[in-house]
Amino acid sequence: MSLALFFSPEDYKQGEIVRIMYIHVPSAWLALGIYGLIALLSFISLVWSNSIAGVLAHAAAPAGTVFSAICLITGVASGEKAPGQLGGYGMQGLLQC
């Protein structure tokens, strides 16, 4: 992954900003998958009173939170105005809030 992140060529429209997607997209997929797993395990725990599913759901929550934070941070960083990109607040907009 480090080779793709540091040595891939820049995009002709978005430039260097496109490299953030090598981190942003996988972390978004992992966060969604973990939160889906938490929902499934919570359902199993509530319906069938399975205590192990409840423990597993609690154990998966910190990982989902970390991947969500990575996704949000890289999403804000990639939101800077780039050529060919519509809108976006970027780091300047975050700091002004």
Image: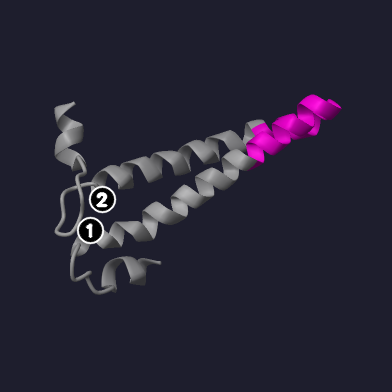
Q: How many marks?
A: 2
Q: Residue furthest right?
A: 48
Q: Quadrant of residue 57?
A: top right
Q: Residue at x 81, y 27 (%)?
A: 47
On the question of residue 56 being in view, the answer is: no
In the picture, the disc for residue 17 is 1
Q: Residues within 10 Å of mark 2 (few under 14, many from 20)?
A: many
Q: Is residue 75 magenta?
A: no
Q: Position of residue 92 (x, y in %)?
A: 14, 38
Q: Which residues are magenta?
A: 37-57
Residue 93 at x, y percent in the picture? 17, 35
Is residue 73 toward the left or the right of residue 58 in the image? left
Kind of residue indicated by mark 2: Ser
Which quarter of the image is occupied by the C terminus? top left
Mostly what secondary structure, the magenta segment? helix
In space, the residues marked 2 and 1 are separated at their CA atoms by: 6 Å
Q: Looking at the image, which residue is at 40% across and 67% down?
A: 1
Tell me which residue sits at (22%, 58%) in the image.
17
Q: Does the magenta-highlighted stretch encompass residue 54?
A: yes
Above or below for 49 versus 40: above
What x and y, as percent, mark residue 8? 28, 73
Left or right: residue 43 versus residue 12 is: right
Q: Position of residue 27 (x, y in %)?
A: 45, 50
CB within 8 Å, label 2 to label 1: yes
| Residue drawn at the location 20% of the way across and 33% of the way down | 94
Q: How is the image coloured?
A: one colour
Q: Which mark is residue 78?
A: 2
Determine whether 26 is above or below 40 in the image: below
Amino acid type assigned to the residue bearing label 1 in the image = Ile
**Quick one: 79 or 22, which is closer to the camera?**
79
Indicate whether 44 appears above or below 88.
Answer: above
